[in-house]
Amino acid sequence: MKKIGMGLIGPGFVAAHHIDAVRRLGDVEVVAIAGSSQESADRKAREYKVDRAYGDFHALIADPDIQVIHNTTPNYLHLPVTMAAIAAGKHVISDKPLAINSRDGRTMRDAAVAAKIGHVVTFNYRGNPLVQQARGMVSRGEAGGVSFVHGHYLQDWLTDPNVYSWRSDPAKGGVSSALGDIGSHWCDLAEHMSGQRIVSVLADLTTVIPVRYSAGASAQAFSGDSSGERTAVEVHAEDLASVLLRFDGGAKGSFSVGQVLPGHKNDLQLEVNGRTCSLKWKQEEQNELWIGHHNKPNAMMAKDPSLVSPEVLRYVHLPGGHQESWADAFLNVMRDAYEWIGDGAAPASKPSMLPTFDDGYRSTCIVEAMLQSHAEGGVWKSVEYVASQA
């Protein structure tokens, strides 16, 4: 069987994980990568053991052996790269956030739908088996109707003022930091697991570290290297935020997000409370699902193929007691994406777990509503989302 040809544009931090995931699928060939220059592309191609390298993303998109484009560029390049790929009739898998604002997100969503190509955003936490287990329990009514959705996503990688990368530059990362980068993940997961959509928000944002020190072109995200000459840069984007939420099904919610909280590495936690039971999932303990009861002992469900619901089995790769990881959840998203693309990417055949450009666009609308809420003094703001007309 002929393999699907994949090309990746933007070989930075997350690129290695995209390449690893598609190679594990077995029916996808990593044909080429494109970087910001021919020199950097050649270097990364050697590192990732990819035969072709392009210093111009247009040349990669034009490669006839490539059917799927992975866009892992910095946020400000998502629009031009993705629109060029769509214009060429290529399927697109984009890293999140889809866009730096809702206008660009809607443009990409509408263009992808009109072109009838596969379009996926890597909200990869959906790929965890126990996230799908909790989602199924809620959708089947086992939680008794959702009344409250809450949690947090806390990190500490920006605690050091000497850490500065393109993610902190509003021209490249967008005007939002914590909300756009990791709050988008939490909100997508909250909607996906609860089965309800966020319709209005009230946000309180803070910039804990207003001055950072940049190493210039050498700055790398998630790097703790504070050596070398530094330049002071004023930072206005939030690195800490708390938000109240209202959902379309009547549920209320709240969450906090932060990137400057020592000791919190990738502390994503989400709890859904119903009338019958509560369900809590923690990313750093992702092989367990806490089930809370009021009239009998609480329970902890382990990830085990003999215990999960039938529709979740496809996302479990190992027997119970064998720990599955972030990379395995990422693989699950990629597998659904490529199966959908391989079947023609018709909307009706999309796997229910798979996040698309519509989900990416919704995320930008939610983040913008939070920014507006804070800017106007902490007032309730509606999420201004426009459904696709196709």
Image (cartoon, helix red, strand yellow):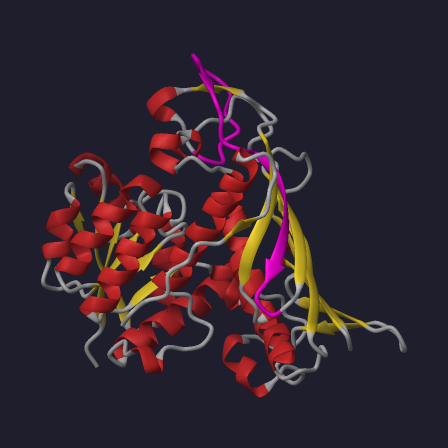
Q: In the rendered image, is residue 121 in sight?
A: yes
Span highlighted in magenta in the image: 221-249
Query: Can you say which quadrant of the picture contains the N terminus?
Result: bottom left
Which of the pair 253/237 is nearer the observer?
253
Quadrant, the C terminus: bottom left
Closer to the camera, 8 or 49?
8
**In the image, what residue occupies the spot 19% across and 36% down?**
37
Give the vertical position of 164 relative to 344 (above or below). Answer: above
- Which quadrant of the structure image shows residue 287? bottom right
Q: Left or right of 113: which side holds 142?
A: right
Position of residue 151 in the picture relative to residue 201 (left or right) = right
Residue at 43% in and 58% down: 362
Task: Please provide percent x and percent y for residue 169.
Answer: 40, 29
| Residue at 19 percent of width and 35 percent of height | 39
Q: How many numbered marks appear?
A: 0
Q: Return the x and y of residue 280 as percentages of the image width and height.
A: 71, 64
Answer whether residue 263 is magenta in the image.
no
Q: In this view, does 260 lie to the left or right of 4?
A: right
Q: Residue, x 34% and y 57% (percent of image)?
A: 19
Question: Is residue 229 one of those drawn in magenta?
Answer: yes
Q: Where is residue 30 in the image (x, y as percent from the top left)?
A: 25, 60
Residue 322's place in the image compared with 209, above or below, is below
Identify the image quadrant of residue 207: top right
Q: Which of 383 and 141 is in front in this view?
A: 383
The one nearer the camera, 331 or 122, is 122
Q: Position of residue 80 (x, y in %)?
A: 21, 46
- Is 346 drawn above or below residue 240 in the view shown? below
